[in-house]
Image (spheres, rainbow, N blue to C red):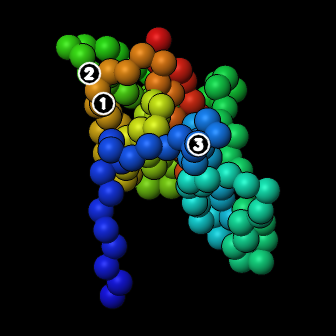
Amino acid sequence: MEEFDIIDMDNVSLKREDGGSYMSKKLVIKRCPKCMAMVKVMKENDSEIMCCGKAMEELVPNVVEASFEKHVPNYLIKDGKIIVTVNHVMEDDHYIEWICMCSGNKEFVVYFEPGDVLEAEFTYMPGAILYAYCNKHLLWKKEVE
């Protein structure tokens, strides 16, 4: 078993000397079209990520509801916290797998299982982006005001 150092990301500079960033400012998720495995891209480049002999495809978040099921995250701000919900079923074959809040160089994720109460609580950060991932209808997002 390999050992890894734990890095306190609050004390790490993500800026390069040329002013660029080492990490993506947006959430980039790629999914295998065959086995449906997903990876989070920490640093983008022009290379393809391969899985099952196929190039993984970037998931582009939807923002407009076009189906009967609801997917776009909703939120309520209360006492410095943001409470995130999605008006969606949580059935064995159709559910929200996770909710993520991204702000600057920080990401916070809550994972769900079928039957769970679909609610996540984070520290309120104006301008953050909320994401919800549905196992059937993929990635959805909403900006926090």
Q: Secondary structure at mark 3?
A: loop
Left or right, 12 with respect to 47, comes to left
Left or right: 10 in relation to 87: left
3D distance between C-alphas at marks 2 and 3: 35 Å
Q: Quadrant of residue 16?
A: top right
Query: Which is in the foreground here, disc 2 or disc 3?
Result: 3
Of residues 17 and 81, which is closer to you in this image?
Answer: 17
Residue drawn 20% across the image and 14% down it: 79
Q: Which residue is mark 3?
A: 17
Callout 3 amino acid: Glu
Identify the mark nearer the N-term, 3 or 1: 3
Q: Which secondary structure, mark 2?
A: strand
Label 2, label 1: how many angstroms apart (C-alpha)?
6 Å
* 2 and 1 marks in contact (CB < 8 Å): yes
Nearer the observer, 12 or 4: 12
Which residue has dot 1 on it? 122
Q: Which mark is residue 79?
A: none
The answer to whether one can see residue 96 in this image is no
- Which residue appears at 77% of the width and 63% of the height? 48
Residue that appears at 57% across and 30% down? 141
**Residue at the image point whose x is 66% and y is 32% from the top:** 62
Q: Where, quadrant-wise, is the N terminus in this rendering?
A: bottom left
Which mark sits nearer the N-terminus, 2 or 3?
A: 3
Amino acid found under the numbered disc labelled 2: Lys
* Distance CA(mark 3)–CA(mark 1): 32 Å
**Residue 111 visible within the image:** yes
Expressed as whole percent of the image width and height from the top left, the position of residue 140 reads: 59, 34
- Tag 1's secondary structure? strand
Tag 3: Cα neighbours inside 10 Å, few (<14), some, or many (≥20)? few
The residue at which mark 2 appears reads as 81
Q: Amino acid at mark 1?
A: Phe
